[in-house]
């Protein structure tokens, strides 16, 4: 009888617990629904107002030169926009007129004159203009980098090095290049995994720079050790990953991106800032062991797109912030100089502000230009009011003007109360102004433990200093009262015992 | 204990003495746990109260401790007190059942209620230190969090050692046998969880069958 009762009870219980199980599975899957988003401390995607809006879209047809065909490179200096129209074997130079807000065609370059002979370009992939106005073109399929003066006259070219460190069987295919402030040319060439190739401006080869470290796990090493030579030749090689793009920041440091990593992007460091000897000096700001910046935290599998973000280009700002371009999902990831994610926007699609195959990004002031290789369109993004508030808040912070920065964060919070970085910014300003209580409140909003602890420590010190007399008085009176009570208690007990 | 006894003053006096006995147990474990059930120093009622206290303090620990010293990352928005309570009660109940199941086969002297009472009483240090930790956390900064966390770790080690001693004394085992039976009990817990999972997944499958049957019928009718 009792057992029967228990069994029935268990069945009812099981029935009740089983019911919600059928309700699970209504989750729509990963991937944010908003155009612009960011992550909270807890890793939730939060929609936010758009920091950029599309202000112009440029195609080759707009200038009567026929559409671009698979353009691969975009470079902007001042108000000049260079488009490497790769499959049309030409460079297109456009100019932006700020007063009229219009774009005009300056010239189309299909060949350069070398020794009186025209030498046509063959699949140019990138272009760079150095501080002296000299133009460098990665003329990829001609296996050379052309150095031209500001009037497009040929000076010299950079070709395959005759150096022992360079495997002569590999074709020299320069893809991307930058020239730093001391006129060293850094070239990212296809099939080269020793890092970036460093040349002098006159074409002499200096060596390789910034090769990425090879990571071998103990497990792989063990298997490699016990396998035969024939087996080993079948295995995956432990080679350093190739960079896929380079960019120069305002201080002359080289930013490099890579996208061919396997496994965890948070360990692969897909974006790097290289100093003169090739050491990565990017400031990373990861929590939960995620070494930001590395793009999306969660990867849905929608519309044939899966896997981590794959950065193909990066653009840097004067405040050491940077925006990475993700080719996989067509998104732009903005980071500040400490590696905090500011916002993510863009996406795949046919709509304005979305891309099919984004390949290059550059900027004119605060405006972004993104080149799409498949649609052959250059999209211009301008800052919205909201975006400019964020931009200015970071600029002020970078310049050490914390109060102005906090005032800007206030403006940001009026438009978006969910913006966690704004709370950090306000907390920082409050801490400097010795408003520890406020600082604690702001830091708690972002769950910043270390900063909260710092503010708390100062608040505690201040509180104890202010209330030291009260504390001492309370402690002394407590001691006196307990003492008195004990004596009284003893006294009564003795009387009781005596009676 | 009946409901009528709830009105008598003696009941509460005895309960108070039983709860106070836990403090004796944690400092004199060998003697304390030997007399725990043999001399009726504690009852299932007092153990239940202790367990409820432990569960409540666990919930308070996760919600009231200052976030910068707490080891866990608790998002208050999604905090579920039932999970926290379950994380305390379920292991202790499962442990008691698993341990009793094995020790009855291994000449253990303890009954199920003895194992349960002794286990709960062994966690007294954890209860006290968790409660103290909530208060301490209000006054310490991020740099001093090691103090708080070390205290909790020590209390856990203390509790686990008390559990071993308790099992030894309750079942009249040697230490080696107590450790052996405890390891077996852990496997037993795993086995029980596996059976539970199997049971619930089968039940939910059969429930889903009827749900889809009803759905199909309603689709046909409309």
Image (tube, rainbow, N blue to C red):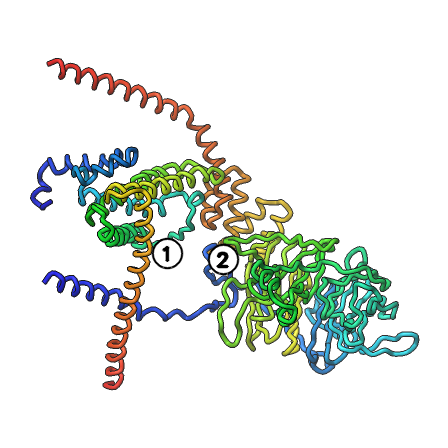
Along the line of sight, which residue is nearer the eye, A281 or A216?
A216
**Residue that label 1 marks:** B78
In which chain is the residue bearing label 2? A
- Compared with A420, A196 (above or below) is below
- Residue drawn where x is 25% and y is 46% of the image: B51
Residue A105: % across, % down: 75, 75
Q: Which mark is residue A415?
A: 2
Q: Quarter-wise, where is residue A11 in the image? A: bottom left
In this view, the residue in front, B72 or A62, is B72
Give the quarter of the figure containing the C terminus of chain A.
Answer: top left
Residue A150 sits in quarter: bottom right
Q: Is residue A364 left or right of residue A171?
A: left
Query: Can residue B221 be seen?
Result: yes
Assess disc 1: are there few (<14), some (14-19) or many (≥20) residues with their C-alpha within 10 Å of its C-alpha: few
Residue A50 locus on image (x, y percent): 53, 64
Q: Residue at x 49, y 62 (%)?
A: A48
Which of the image's four quarters has the N terminus of chain A? bottom left
Say which of A237 and A297 sits in front.
Answer: A237
Task: Please identify the quarter of the rendering in which residue A318 is found.
Answer: bottom right
Q: Marks 1 and 2: which is nearer the front? A: 1
Look at 68% across and 78% down and name the residue there.
Answer: A70
Residue nearer the viewer, A211 or A436 = A211
Q: Residue at x 36, y 43 (%)?
A: B156
Above or below for A353 versus A489: below
Q: x%, y% of residue A227?
A: 61, 66
Q: Chain of mark 1?
A: B
Q: Secondary structure at mark 1?
A: helix
Indicate the secondary structure of the residue bearing disc 2. Answer: helix
The crowding category of the residue bearing disc 2, from other C-alpha atoms within 10 Å (few below 14, some 14 to 19, many at least 20), is: some
State if disc 2 and disc 1 touch (CB < 8 Å).
no
Q: Residue A287: where, in percent of width, then height?
A: 52, 53
- Report whether residue A81 is seen: no
């Amino acid at each position: 009888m009792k057992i029967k009762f228990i069994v029935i009870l268990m069945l009812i219980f099981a029935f009740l617990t089983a019911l919600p199980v059928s309700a699970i599975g209504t989750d729509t899957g990963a991937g944010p629904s908003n155009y612009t988003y960011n992550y909270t401390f807890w890793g939730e995607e939060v929609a936010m107002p758009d920091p950029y809006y599309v202000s112009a879209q440029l195609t080759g047809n707009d200038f009567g030169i026929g559409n671009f065909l698979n353009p691969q490179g975009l470079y902007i200096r001042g108000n000049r926009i260079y488009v490497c129209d790769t499959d049309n074997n030409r460079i297109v130079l456009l100019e932006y007129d700020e007063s009229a807000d219009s774009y005009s065609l300056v010239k189309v370059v299909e060949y350069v004159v070398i020794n009186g002979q025209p030498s046509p370009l063959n699949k140019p992939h990138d272009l760079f203009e150095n501080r002296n106005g000299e133009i460098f073109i990665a003329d990829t399929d001609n296996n050379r980098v052309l150095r031209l003066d500001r009037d497009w006259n040929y000076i010299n070219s950079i070709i395959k090095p005759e150096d022992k460190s360079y495997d002569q069987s590999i074709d020299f295919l320069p893809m991307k290049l930058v020239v730093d402030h001391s006129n060293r040319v850094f070239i990212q060439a296809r099939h080269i995994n020793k890092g970036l190739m460093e040349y002098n401006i006159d074409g002499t080869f200096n060596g390789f720079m910034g090769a990425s470290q090879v990571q071998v796990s103990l497990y792989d090493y063990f298997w490699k050790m016990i396998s035969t030579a024939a087996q080993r030749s079948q295995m995956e090689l432990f080679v350093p990953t190739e960079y896929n793009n380079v960019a120069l920041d305002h201080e002359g440091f080289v930013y490099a991106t890579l996208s061919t990593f396997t496994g965890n992007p948070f360990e692969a460091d897909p974006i790097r800032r290289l100093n003169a000897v090739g050491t990565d000096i990017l400031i990373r700001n990861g929590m939960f062991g995620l070494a930001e910046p590395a793009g999306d935290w969660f990867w849905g599998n929608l519309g044939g797109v899966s896997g981590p973000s794959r950065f193909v280009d990066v653009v840097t700002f004067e405040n050491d912030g940077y925006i990475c371009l993700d080719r996989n999902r067509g998104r732009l990831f903005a980071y500040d100089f400490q590696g905090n994610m500011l916002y993510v926007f863009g996406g795949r699609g046919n709509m304005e502000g979305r891309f099919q195959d984004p390949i290059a990004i550059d900027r004119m002031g605060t405006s972004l230009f993104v080149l799409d290789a498949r649609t052959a369109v250059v999209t211009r993004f301008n800052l919205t009011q909201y975006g400019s508030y964020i931009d200015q808040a970071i600029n002020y912070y970078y310049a050490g003007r914390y109060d102005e920065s906090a005032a800007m964060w206030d403006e940001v919070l009026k438009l978006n109360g969910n913006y966690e970085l704004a709370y950090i910014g306000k907390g920082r300003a409050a801490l400097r102004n010795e408003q520890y209580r406020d600082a604690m409140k702001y830091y708690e909003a972002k769950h910043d433990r270390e900063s909260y602890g710092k503010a708390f420590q100062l608040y505690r010190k201040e509180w104890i200093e202010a209330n030291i007399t009260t504390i001492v008085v309370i402690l002394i009176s407590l001691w006196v009262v307990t003492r008195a009570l004990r004596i009284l208690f003893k006294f009564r007990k003795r009387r009781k015992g005596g009676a | 204990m009946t409901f009528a006894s709830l009105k008598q003053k003696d009941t509460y006096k005895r309960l108070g003495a039983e709860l106070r006995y836990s403090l004796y147990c944690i400092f004199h474990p060998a003697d304390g746990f030997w007399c725990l059930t043999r001399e009726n120093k504690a009852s299932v009622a007092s153990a239940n109260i202790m367990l409820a206290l432990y569960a409540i303090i666990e919930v308070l620990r996760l919600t009231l401790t200052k976030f910068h010293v707490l080891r866990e990352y608790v998002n208050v928005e999604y905090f579920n007190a039932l999970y926290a309570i379950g994380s305390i009660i379920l292991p202790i109940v499962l442990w008691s059942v698993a341990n009793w199941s094995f020790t009855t086969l291994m000449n253990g002297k303890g009954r199920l209620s003895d194992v349960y009472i002794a286990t709960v009483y062994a966690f007294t240090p954890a209860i006290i230190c968790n409660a103290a930790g909530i208060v301490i956390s209000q006054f310490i900064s991020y740099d001093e969090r090691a103090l708080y966390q070390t205290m909790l770790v020590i209390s856990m080690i203390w509790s686990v050692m008390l559990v071993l001693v308790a099992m030894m004394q309750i079942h009249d085992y040697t230490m080696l046998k107590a450790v052996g039976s405890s390891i077996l009990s852990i496997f037993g817990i795993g086995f029980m969880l596996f059976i539970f999972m199997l049971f619930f997944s089968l039940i939910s499958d059969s429930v889903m069958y009827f749900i889809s049957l009803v759905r199909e019928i309603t689709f046909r009718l409309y």
